[in-house]
Image: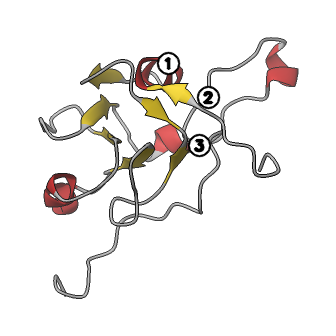
């Protein structure tokens, strides 16, 4: 973590950093990441299991990392071949010699786990 300091990025930079196609506003500010169920404004989440695609319509996340076939007009989508893989830590800038673009893995967040069905879905 970064000692409580928030790292902010815009959706366009985040999409480029995780090699995703952005569908939505390129200037949305993202400050952290969370699960679809727990996310709030300014947070990015992910959908790796199509079984939970309906959660995109109820999440409070500002943006969601999804597979290319997913569509929504409700939130910004970052379309990547493997949404879960995009959450892996980014290479350290000390290893590459250049500053890296903030990615969901470098934005402070709780430990992300695949979305679980809510009590009402069980």
Residue on which the image places disc 1? 13
Quarter where residue 107 is shown: top right
Q: Which is in the foreground here, disc 2 or disc 3?
A: 2
Mark 1 touching mark 2, by CB under 8 A?
yes
Scheme of image coloration: secondary structure
Which secondary structure lies at badge 2? Answer: loop
Q: Is residue 55 above or below residue 108?
A: below
Task: Identify the residue at horizontal 17%, vertical 86% (top origin).
Answer: 120
Disc 1 and disc 3: Cα gap in Å?
17 Å
Earlier in the chain: of badge 1 and badge 2, it is 1
- Between residue 29 and residue 36, name the one nearer to us: 29
Give the numbered dot on residue 88: 3
Q: Quadrant of the C terminus?
A: bottom left
Tell me which residue sits at (24%, 24%) in the image: 24
**Tag 1 secondary structure:** helix
Mark 1 crowd level (few <14, some 14–19, many ≥20, 10 Å Cα) = many
User: Label 2 neighbourhood size at 10 Å, few (<14), some (14-19), many (20+)?
Assistant: many
The residue labelled by disc 2 is: 102
Q: CA distance from mark 2 to mark 3?
A: 12 Å
């Amino acid at each position: 973590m970064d000692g409580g300091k928030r790292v902010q990025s815009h959706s366009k930079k985040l999409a480029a950093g995780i090699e995703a196609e952005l569908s939505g506003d390129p200037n949305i500010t993202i400050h952290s990441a969370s699960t679809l169920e727990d996310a709030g404004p300014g947070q990015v989440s992910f959908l790796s299991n199509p079984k939970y695609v309906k959660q995109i319509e109820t999440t409070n996340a500002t943006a969601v990392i999804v597979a290319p076939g997913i569509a929504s007009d409700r939130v910004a989508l970052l379309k990547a071949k493997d949404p879960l893989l995009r959450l892996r830590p980014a290479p350290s800038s000390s290893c590459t010699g250049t500053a890296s673009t903030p990615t969901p893995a470098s934005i402070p967040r709780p430990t992300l786990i695949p979305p679980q069905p809510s009590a009402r879905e069980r």
